[in-house]
Image: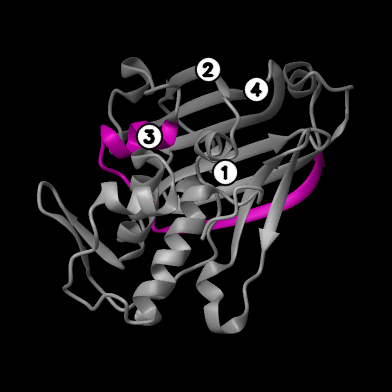
């Protein structure tokens, strides 16, 4: 069962337990899972949280969801290769931890000629347009992270004019453009923020921060996004859970707010 005192997201705990139950043979490939209502009642969570767990398993390829019919086992989890899970959506992780994050979009614009560095990271030519978002994340009115995201404009045309759903880039890409990352590369390192970044994060000039560089791709290896996120180290940490070898799929990394 889920541990509500754990910093690990509820939906992730449920997804991993369902995965293990399927792997143990409680349900067979092709068989329908219990209803969302029944599973939510079993785990004593909201249907929204339960749906997030099923979404995770669907993106992983373990289950298939059919509207109005139910959720069916698609593959044996033991045969599904699962990479280390990293929290692509900061706001989604924070909500699962019980916080109410506020996202401020500081900048949203289309760039006709990206820098050679960004063009290379996105696999574009210098003449390809990109869209750039700069967003500030706050918890309890305190800034905790600053993110700069660069995306190929052809994948999400008009996104800067349309605006983001609840200021969430991940949610907008999913719901409006049906874009889901399946491969994510992450680079974590210590860095010092610029004067502008320090002012936005309410830090001293030149303060040390945790820098996370992310590049996500679709199944066809098209690069979806390159993002550079700066986390205020005195307010935000990363929780890394390494599972036993026989259940390596449960290895994951997630944000944890420092209170």
Please state if 249 lies on the left or on the right of 137 as rendered: left
Marks 4,2: beta carbons within 8 A: no
Reading the chain from its start, which is encountered first: label 1 or label 4?
Answer: 1
Provide the residue designation for mark 4. 138
Under tag 2, what secondary structure?
strand
For disc 1, the marked residue is 117
Mark number, residue 171: 3
Q: Which mark is residue 43?
A: none
Q: Which residues are magenta?
A: 169-191
Which element carries disc 1, helix, strand or loop?
Answer: helix
Circles 4 and 3, Cβ within 8 Å, touching? The answer is: no
- Residue placed farthest to the left in the image? 68
Separation of marks 4 and 2 at Cα, in angstroms: 16 Å
Residue 83 x/y as whole percent: 49, 68
In this image, 135 relative to 77: left or right? right
**Quarter of the rendering containing residue 125:** top left
| Residue visible at 37% across and 23% down in the picture | 165
Q: Work out whether residue 127 can be spotted.
A: no
Classify 247 as above or below 67: below
Comparing labels 1 and 4, the label whose residue is closer to the camera: 4
Position of residue 88 relative to residue 63, above or below, is above
Q: Earlier in the sequence, mark 2 or mark 1?
A: 2
């Amino acid at each position: 069962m889920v541990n509500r005192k754990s910093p690990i997201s509820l939906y992730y705990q449920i997804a991993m337990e369902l995965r293990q139950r399927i792997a143990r043979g409680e349900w067979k490939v092709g068989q329908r899972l219990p209803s969302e209502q029944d599973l939510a009642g079993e785990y004593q969570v909201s249907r929204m949280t339960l749906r997030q767990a099923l979404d995770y398993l669907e993106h992983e390829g373990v289950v298939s969801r059919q509207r109005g019919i139910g959720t069916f086992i698609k593959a044996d989890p033991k045969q599904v290769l699962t990479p280390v899970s990293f929290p692509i959506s900061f706001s989604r992780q924070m909500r699962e931890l019980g916080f109410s994050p506020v996202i401020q979009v500081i900048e949203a614009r289309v760039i006709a000629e990206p820098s050679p560095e960004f063009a290379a990271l996105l696999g574009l030519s210098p003449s390809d347009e990109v869209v750039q978002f700069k967003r500030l994340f706050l918890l309890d009115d305190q800034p905790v992270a600053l993110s700069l995201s660069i995306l190929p404009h052809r994948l999400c045309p008009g996104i800067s004019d349309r605006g983001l759903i609840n200021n969430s880039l991940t949610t907008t890409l999913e719901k409006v453009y049906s874009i889901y990352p399946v491969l994510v590369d992450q680079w974590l390192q210590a860095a010092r923020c610029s004067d502008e970044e320090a002012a936005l994060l309410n830090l001293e000039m030149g303060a040390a921060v945790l820098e996370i560089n992310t590049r996500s791709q679709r199944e066809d290896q098209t690069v979806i996004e390159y993002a550079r996120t700066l986390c205020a180290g005195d307010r935000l940490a990363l929780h890394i859970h390494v599972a036993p070898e026989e259940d390596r799929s449960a290895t994951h990394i997630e944000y944890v707010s420092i209170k």
